[in-house]
Image (cartoon, rainbow, N blue to C red):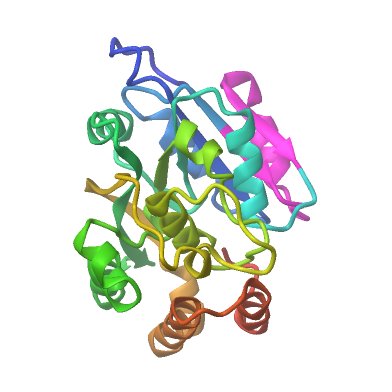
Amino acid sequence: LRLRSTRVSSRACRVSVVVPVVNEEACISSCLASLGALDPPPLEVIVVDGGSRDGTAGRVRKARARRVALIETDFGSRAKQMNEGARVAKGDFVMFLHADTVPPLDAVSLVDRSFADPRVVLGAFTAILAHEGRTMWGMNLLHQAKTHLGACFFRPMAAARGMKVFFGDQAMVVRREAFVSCGGFHESLSTMEDMDLCVKMFYGIKSLEAGRTSLQQSRGKQSRGARLVAIDRCVHTSGRRVAEWGSLKSLQLFLVLSLSYAFGASPSALNELAGKVYSEIR
């Protein structure tokens, strides 16, 4: 893995990439290779292992001398993994990238431009899901609708003011200072932590009450002027989960979890729902 030295602005290089993994031996090498091809390169790549039982960590160690850091934990929670990666990150911006997602070659420059407005605290790319050469157009359209219209169902006024709903396979990017200030991902959630972060950063919620999501705590609050942006480029992500479950079941699970969150389910209730259906495919 070679991170090329390209002349760019100092701010453009201040992007840290955090990759949470559990048992991703099959795709972590290609993930690191895609990050090595970025031009300009990111400041650093931080892989946070949540307790893999395969050869994931070994494959990452081979790249450590080439500016890839490995943090090994037993968290088993993607929210905790991502928070840990962000905690040690040195960049002004942090991209949270799934191991089966490939960002565009100019991703660092795109982040630089998208966050030029200091009010922007969170952004994400458009995800294109595909599996074994087949593009999943229906799920991709659903992704687009969810991003731009999802908030209309539970916070219509906030949606009118620019609130968006991003999911992790869109390669979410945060302004690190704002992310740390709000406490990062909700560590009590084993699912919907990405949607919860959108709510949290839009409203500027800095502390959470026990047993409540950011959405539950946002009632009656007004946005403090934070902006969420859709970065105008695609990332390509694996549709292996959709392939495992089938399109109809995937849609059902998406709606059940999303609507449960939107209508006020507690973290424990959401986790119980997710625990009944999720496999290790992340």
User: Where 15 sits versus 218, above or below?
Assistant: above
* Residue at left offset 52%, top offset 65%: 217
User: Does 78 sit left or right of 246 as displayed?
Assistant: right
Q: Can the viewer see residue 50 in this picture?
A: yes
20 displayed left or right of 169: right
Pick whichever, 160 or 106, lies toward us. Answer: 160
Name the residue located 41 percent from the left edge and 56 percent from the top edge.
198
| Front in this rendered view, residue 2 or 122 | 122
Q: Is residue 176 above or below residue 14?
A: below
Q: Quadrant of residue 113?
A: top left
Percent x, y of residue 161:
22, 57
Asked whether 66 falls inside the magenta stretch, the response is yes
Res 144 visible: no
Q: Is residue 10 left or right of residue 30?
A: left
In the displayed structure image, the side of residue 229 where residue 208 appears, left or right? right
What residue appears at the point 62 percent right and 55 percent down from the top-left corner?
78
Where does residue 227 sit, x and y in percent of width and height? 29, 46
Write down the region rendered in magenta: 46-72
Query: In the figure, residue 258 lies in which quadrant?
Result: bottom left
Rendering coords of residue 136 (x, y %): 30, 72
Q: Quadrant of residue 238?
A: bottom left
